[in-house]
Amino acid sequence: MHNQRSEQLGFTLIEVMVALLVVGIALPALMFQLGAQLDATDRFRQQTIASWVAKNQMSHLQLDAAAGIMSTAAFREGETELAGRRWSWQLSVEETPVPGLLRHRLDVAAMERPADTLASLTSYLSAAQAIGPSALGGDVDGQD
């Protein structure tokens, strides 16, 4: 006679196949999330460096204003290099309701995607303004 055992050793083929199915469904979803997280990290890095570019360019503008070399152009653009990448910037100047006070908005994008603004910086200067604590202010907005 056969000695029947009531306990089972190992896994059945069905159990192994179900476990592989679960892993096969979960693994691609996990890889997708990991890729999305890496993309978000790279985007944040680009926005940070773009905000540095904006601050540098705005500092140049404020120093020019302090030296009395304020440009009257309503729009300027240029390129610069920072952190091993090329960046394009656009400066727009608009009048405000306050006489003699100009709103300067600087938008920065990577050269590879100039239409994708990564950072914007706004500052208010007057043509006769000497650089001081109030001239160094501004708001930095990261764009998504």
Image: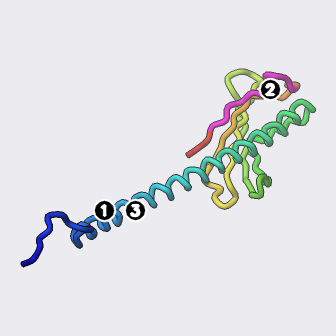
Please, what is the three-letter code of the amino acid marked with disc 2?
Ala
What residue did someone put label 1 on? 22
Give the residue at x 63% y 58%.
113
Residue shown at 74% from the left, 57% from the top: 85
Q: Earlier in the sequence, mark 2 or mark 1?
A: 1
Mark sitting earlier along the chain (2/3)? 3
Q: Where does the image place residue 124, in percent across and percent down from the top left?
A: 74, 28
Give the quarter of the image for residue 132: top right
The mark lying in front, picked from 2 and 3, is 3
The residue at which mark 2 appears reads as: 135
Q: Are marks 1 and 3 in contact (CB under 8 Å)?
A: no
Mark 1 falls on what kind of element? helix
Q: Nearer the viewer, residue 31 or 84?
A: 31
Tell me the residue that label 3 is attached to.
27
Question: Where is residue 103 drawn, in percent x and y?
Answer: 71, 31
The stretch in magenta equals 131-141
Vertical comparison of 105 with 89: above or below: above
